[in-house]
């Protein structure tokens, strides 16, 4: 199995070192696997999508314009 080296904050390292009864590599591996599976599903969904970055930008503008108009009415 391949190995990976991670940089972690000192406070996390201190906690991990104080609990050497826990198999931290298994916890990290399961967490990364869960995240990777979500990414894999997202990639599969996006593979079939025809929604472009330009579409997202247009939707963003429309939503922001709508919110601005709504709040301007509330303030008036």
Image (cartoon, helix red, strand yellow):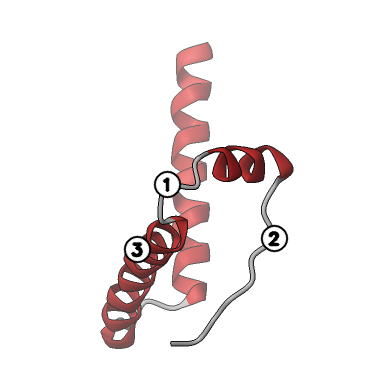
Dot 3: element: helix
Dot 1: element: loop
Single out the residue that lies furthest toward the top.
76
Judge from the rendering whether residue 14 lies leftward or rightward of residue 66; answer left or right: right
Q: Nearer the viewer, residue 39 or 6?
A: 6
- Residue at (58%, 76%) from the top-left corner? 4
* Residue holding disc 1: 21
Instruction: Characterize the local packing of mark 1: few (<14), some (14-19) or many (20 or more) Cα atoms within 10 angstroms.
Output: few
Q: Nearer the viewer, residue 28 or 17?
A: 17
Find residue 63 and report its horizontal and vertical position in percent. 44, 47
Q: Nearer the viewer, residue 51 or 18?
A: 18
Find residue 65 and report its horizontal and vertical position in percent. 51, 43
* Residue holding disc 3: 30
Judge from the rendering whether residue 55 lies leftward or rightward of residue 72; answer left or right: left
Dot 2: element: loop
Callout 3 touching callout 2 (CB < 8 Å): no
Count of labels in the image: 3
Query: Which image quadrant for residue 29?
Result: bottom left
Judge from the rendering whether residue 26 lies leftward or rightward of residue 15; answer left or right: left
Q: Earlier in the sequence, mark 3 or mark 2?
A: 2
Q: Nearer the viewer, residue 1 or 41?
A: 1
Q: Earlier in the sequence, mark 2 or mark 1?
A: 2
Callout 3 touching callout 1 (CB < 8 Å): no
* Residue holding disc 2: 7
Observer able to see residue 76: no
Structural distance between the alpha carbons of marks 3 and 2: 18 Å
Observer able to see residue 25: yes
In the image, residue 3 above or below residue 58: below
Instruction: Characterize the local packing of mark 3: few (<14), some (14-19) or many (20 or more) Cα atoms within 10 angstroms.
Output: few
Find residue 67 and report its horizontal and vertical position in percent. 46, 35
Find residue 5 and report its horizontal and vertical position in percent. 64, 72
């Amino acid at each position: 199995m391949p190995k990976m080296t991670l940089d972690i904050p000192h406070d996390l390292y201190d906690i991990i070192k104080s609990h050497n009864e826990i198999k931290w590599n298994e916890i990290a591996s399961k967490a990364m696997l869960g995240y990777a599976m979500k990414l894999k599903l997202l990639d599969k969904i996006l593979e079939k999508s025809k929604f472009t970055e330009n579409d997202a930008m247009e939707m963003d503008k429309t939503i922001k314009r709508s919110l601005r108009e709504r709040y301007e009415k509330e303030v008036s």
